[in-house]
Structure formats: structure tokens, C-alpha cells
Image (spheres, coloured by chain):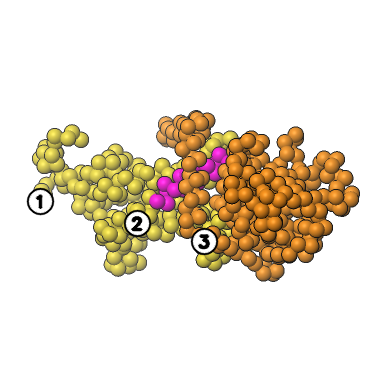
Chain colours: A yellow, B orange
Amino acid sequence: MDGSTTDEDVAATTGNRVVLRHRISTRVWHWVNAIAVIVLLMSGLMISNAHPRLYWGQYGANFDHAWLELPRFPGWATIPSSYSLSGARRWHLAFAWIFAVGLLLYIATSLLNRHAQRDLAPTKRELAPRAIWRDIVSHARLQFPTGEDALHYNVLQKLSYFGVLFVILPLLVLTGLTMSPAMGAAWPWLLEIFGGRPSARSIHFICATAMALFIAVHLLMVLLAGPVEHIRSMITGRHRVHTPETEE
Amino acid sequence: MIGRRHFVLGGSGLLLAGCDRLDRSESFRGVLRSAEGLTMRAQRLVSSRNALAPEYREADMSPIFRSNGTRRPGTPEYAAHLSERFANWRLIIDGLVARPLSIPMDAVRRLPLQTQITRHDCVEGWSAIGMWHGVRLSLLLQAAGLSTRAKYLVFHCADRFGARPFYESIDLVDAFHPQTILAWGMNKGLLPIAHGAPLRLRVERQLGYKHAKYVQRIEAVESLAGIHGGKGGYWEDVADYEWYAGI
């Protein structure tokens, strides 16, 4: 969008209203986190290749029972693309800093500016089973909200964004730390929460899988709901609302 | 649809090619590597110097404690020591010390005993819990009179990878940690060959590859630069693993 054009000009010429949809904190974190998460997922798959077995409990190695044996992930899905545990760890542990610090700052900002409470936390009315069902049905029919309804998140969006921001991502950081022998000494409560290093590693993998699924559904929804408009609004923050007749 | 799939695969290919290229760039690796120092400083900031690694009950021990790395050193010297039941194996402590020591194995086993049940965390991701019997490293360092110039301890080992001797190193924070021991026993017996007989390091707040096995000599040094590949350990030199393995 040209810098000299004001939102009012746009609204006047197109008959649409332009609103500020995403704050700068949301936009910066979204893209920084997107890069970090993709690097973490892909380097994580390489780390998994070094010992693709998952256990529950305080110990777990080759002679112990694994609850899940993972396939060897192919080179196109891993960082680096050919086997290197040390290389994957270097990527993973460097981007883990960006990921964890970014997450901490974004959670703090979102609580302070009340983005979390206002936009992400579902209301009691939205959480009614009938309301959730209605939202599931409209998603299944690929009916996406338009006009003013598109200005706030629907309940499935709220639940998934809230769940990712406050459950999945923090769990990834905490279970990651639990796997560190130095952190086991520094913060032994981590091992107590997760029930041991092998358990923390299993939860880490489950949360990473949930995150990968979230990304897949998220990208699909953006594609279906209008990729150009949505990607632009996550970059510029401005979102065009199609309200043909009524101007404010 | 095919177009989109090609787009996604193409994007993934570009991303990977980019990452692999970055991975080959020494300066980018330097940027990533700076996380190692950051992690070490942060971990030491949030933990007290003597914060203990968790210790476990006998009931928590791994039924089978797998070994890793060298399972049996292949040199004739080691075979000879083995046939003598390590009667002539000596632990040498030298370098920047006031009183270099050379202690026969049976004397090492008579030193004050410390037993701990701890978790061994491999860099690959598996964990095993075992019981270790040995002597606190700090006792030996006090006996040898560590110089104030010393910053690192280098553990020279009897196992070889091809022609390269295995070695590892730790700094003084870990050297004087109350759980850092030279273990000569495991699970109420003598240390098995696969686990580093007759003597190995236990440095409980770091990953398994730091726990040098078959230890023959501990050298106190000011810098790691002149030793073998200069990165402070065999795996650090040949496979680019981090020297600080607290995570």
C-alpha cells in the first residue's frame, strides 16, 4: 500500500473499510516465530533420527520398552539435509533461544496490552457446545466469516491460537529444558513436573507434532480464506473489510 | 494441485539448500555457535555452583545400562593391562600442579569412597540410570595442588579411534563439583570394560560424551588450544560437537 494513501482514501475509492487488524507485536512475533519454529521442527527431525525411540519414565534406552518407534525422517525434511547430529543440535539450540525469548516477550506483551484477554480467550458464550458445533460446521462447509464478523476470531481460532500460545509452545520450551542435564540440577522441579527426561522428550515430540499439525491447518485455512489479504494483513497490519453498503 | 505441490516441494528444497549452504559457511556457523556460550552462561547464572544433579533410588536404575563410544579399547597396551587386571595401571595428574601425582589403581580404590545413583544422558537422546563408585575429583586436585593458572582439566584416555586418542576436558566449575568423581566401580561391582575400566569420569551436569572412559592421565592446563584438535575433546574435534554439553 502506497504510503501517501490514507485508509480513508482507500475506503472511499473501494467502498471498503480498512482496519488495523494485527498489532506490531503480533506481526513481528508471528514472522520471527514462524522462522524459528520451522527451523526447530526440521532440525528436531534430524535429532530424532539419532535415536528414533520414545520412552516414558526416568530412564529409556535401547533395551528398555519404547512406546513409539519413529521412522527415519528423510533428508528433505531435516536440517541439515544429510546426517549430522552435531549440526542439527547447533541449529536447534541457537533457534531455541530466539523461540523461547520471543515467546516470553510476546506472552508478556499480550497479557499487558490485553490482546490475550480480549482477542484470544474465548468467552463463556462461545464455549457453549452448540456455539462450538456451529463453528465446526461452518468450517467444514468452508464458510468463512465476512464483513464485521471477520474482524474477531471465531471460537475454533481462539481455542487453537490460545492453545498454541499458552500450552503447546511453553510446553515445548519447558520439556526442552528438562532434557538438559544442567537444568536437571538447576531446576529439579522440571523433572518432577514431567516425570523424567525420557517422558519430557516424549512430550516434546508430541507437542512438536501438534505444532506441525497446527501449521498445516493454519496454512490451509489461510489459503482457503484468501491468502493475499491474510498474508498482507499479517505484514502491514491492515485488513480490508468488505462492507459494500454500510459505511460507519 | 500439482502446481501447488511443486511449489511446496520447491520451497522446501530452496529452504534446505539455503540452510545447507549456511551450514557450510564458517561465519554463519560462528553465529549459531555463539549460542553455546550463551547457554553455558545462562545455565550457570540460574544454578548455584554446587547445584546437584538428581540422584535416584536403586529401584529407579536401568535394568540394562547400555554402553556407547568405545566398548573395548583395541590396543595391545590395553589388552596387557586387562590381563594384569589393571595392577600396573596408574592415574597420572600433572600439568599446572604443584605436586604431580602417579597413583596406582589399587591406591585409587582405597581413596575415600563416594557412591551416587545418577542419570546418564546421551547426546543422542537416550538416558540410563546407574550407580557409580569412585573418588571425588576435587580431593585429587587438592592433593596435587592445582595452580591458580589452571583453567581446564584434560582427560587423556587409553581408547583410540583409528590413530586418534580419545580425550575430553572440563573447566574448574565442573571439576570441583561435589558429584564429579573418577569412578572405578559401577552397580556395586568393578567398572565393566564397556563402561571404561578401570577408571572413568562422571561429570553429572553434562551429556554422556564428556564422561571420559579409560582415564590414564589428567592434565591441568591454561588453554585447550594446543591439545590435539584444540576444541577440547575428541568429539568436539572430529564431529563438531559443542565443548559445553550441559544441554
Badge 1 sits on which subunit? A
Residue beneath label 3, please?
B48
Q: Where is residue B222 shown, x and y percent of the image?
A: 60, 43
Residue B178 screen position, x and y as percent = 62, 62
Pick the quarter of the image with the N terminus of chain B.
top left
Q: CA distance from mark 1 to mark 3?
A: 61 Å
| Residue drawn where x is 73% and y is 57% of the image | B183
Residue with the mark numbered 2: A107
Q: Which residue is mark 1?
A: A248
Q: Which residues are magenta?
A: A86-101
Q: Are marks 1 and 3 in contact (CB under 8 Å)?
A: no
Q: Is residue A65 magenta?
A: no
User: In terms of depth relative to the viewer, which is nearer, A66 or A60?
Assistant: A60
> Measured from the top left, where is residue B23 in percent x and y?
51, 33
Q: Quadrant of residue A11?
A: top left
**CA distance for labels 2 and 1:** 33 Å
Question: What distance separates the C-alpha of mark 3 from that of mark 2?
Answer: 28 Å
Task: Report whether mark 1 lies on the same chain as mark 3.
Answer: no
SS under mark 1: loop
Is residue B13 visible in this depiction of the protein? no
Disc nearest the viewer among 2 and 1: 2
Point out residue B229 in the picture as x, y percentages from the top left corner.
Answer: 64, 35
Q: Which one is in front, B40 or A42?
A: B40
B68 w.r.t. A121: above or below? above
Secondary structure at badge 2 equals: helix
Image side of residue A125 versus residue B105, left or right: left
| Label 2 in the same subunit as label 1 | yes
* Amino acid on which disc 1 is placed: Glu
- What SS does tag 3 mark? loop
Return the chain for callout 2. Answer: A
The residue at the point 77 percent across, 44 percent down is B158
Badge 1 crowding class, 10 Å Cα cut-off, few under 14, some 14 to 19, many 20 or more, is few
